[in-house]
Amino acid sequence: MDQEQIQSVQGTEDLLPGQWALWTKLYGTARRLFERYGYGEIRTPVFEDTRLFVKGTGETTEIVEKQMYSIPTGEDESITLRPEGTPPVIRSYLEHGLHKQRPFQKLYYVGPMFRRERPQKGRLRQFHQLGVEAIGSSNPLLDAETIVLAVAVFHELGLSDFEVRLNTIGCAECRGRLRAEMRRALEPRLSELCDDCRRRIDRNVFRVLDCNNEGCRAIVVELPTVAAGVCSECAEHYSRVKAALDAAGVEYAEDPFLVRGLDYYTRTVYEVRHRGIGARDAICGGGRYDGLVELLGGPPTPSLGFAIGAESTILAMESEQGGAPDEDARVQAFVVCFEDEARQSCFELLHELRAAGVSADMDYEGRSAKAQMRTANRLGAKICLLVGRDELEQGTVTVRDMTESEQRTVPRAEAVAAARCRVEPNPTT
Ligand code: HAM
């Protein structure tokens, strides 16, 4: 009977066994560096009360306006698949009283996020982020530290074709004043703006600055920059961030049009953009959000953080390094079974090898001994343990060294020890 084959949902991706090499490298490197910089892992649920994002991420953002996957759970109640990690981390920080234990906390998270975006290269509807949040300090050195950390992750991954973009968008007071000034400047030119920007004037006027439409860009380049209009404290904060980055030897480009798409940002904002991955080139985005903790019901708690986009970073790694070769799972040893009657005995030997810390496998498809040896080679096995009729009768196992193409027969009781001393110790034991 012809059954319909159901496909994956648009904007989602399967990660197949042969594709893990780069992901493992990315996750291992990020975790190692996050921890080296003093961040501890936090894991929050994949879905939250919708109000958390409406309030936290911001009602006027594209994410909340158009991109959330929300599921009604009652009258006026719904839950939403998290589109980003920052509001959930702050919710958890407050809910568990972490601020009472220690107001300053450095937390990191990794996991899937969900946004109903138009799928394109590097833009998915389920994607993954590796993020940090440094909660409870307004020190500009901390802004610099997070940028240094993001750059260290990318360097450690072997990336170099990227650029840090930096800007300041001012504190809440600056933003109120600048918002009014920008509206005044743009109102006479409303008819020249794109439809989206005409809407943005009321809802989120700063987003006009990063509109890609040529007409809008021509207008915003004539406006005074946000950085030039911030108060003296914000200007001082910004110059101290830059001085700290200079001292750390991290290069950056100031970008007066960088405003970021989330409502909570204040003062420092930044993105890391990669030159080899197409139009959606941000591999990391972050910034300060000094008002978010209070907005979510906590005490005034200046904070900041960033999130690295896993899929975008993998694309960047592939573009610079040509992708990792597809590899099957690798083992140190392979048990080769010559006769059906030896299968049970092979299975027991396999179990003993693994219990002794040797990664090992055997054939489950009933293939010939020759084909089994080919599999062993493909899996990179250093040794094969051969069991046939002779071995069964004599209570022995033949241990074949695949790199030196030599073999010797040992008593069955010594087979595991003989295997162990030929393979490197398994790092997981
Ligand atoms: P964001 O700029 O929205 O910031 O996302 C950070 C990164 O996640 C982006 O630079 C991009 O690499 C990746 N990303 C975003 N959307 C998608 C998508 N649809 N498909 C694939 N990758 C995507 C935030 O999410 C903030 N929470 C970052 C932050 C943390 N700010 C302060 N703390």
Image: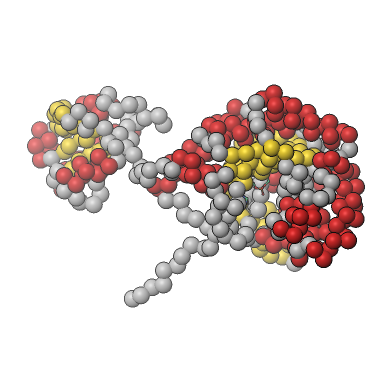
Where is residue 104 shown, x and y percent of the image? 75, 31
Total numbered circles: 0
Q: Residue at x 13, y 45 (%)?
A: 339
Viewer-nearest residue: 358 or 382: 382
Position of 102 compared to 18: left or right? right
Is residue 146 visible to us here?
yes
Quarter of the N terminus within the rendering: bottom left
Q: Residue at x 75, y 31 (%)?
A: 241
Vertical comparison of 73 with 53: above or below = below
Display colour scheme: secondary structure
Quarter of the C terminus within the rendering: top left
Position of 233 compared to 376: left or right? right
Q: Quadrant of residue 357?
A: top left
Viewer-nearest residue: 69 or 239: 239
Position of 46 compared to 52: left or right? left
Position of 333 compared to 319: left or right? left
Viewer-nearest residue: 195 or 38: 195
Where is residue 221 shown, x and y percent of the image? 78, 50
Q: Residue at x 88, y 60 (%)?
A: 187
Is residue 291 visible to us here?
no
Q: Residue at x 41, y 69 (%)?
A: 5
Where is residue 170 shown, x and y percent of the image? 83, 41
Where is residue 224 shown, x and y percent of the image? 84, 46
Residue at the bottom extreme of this rendering: 1
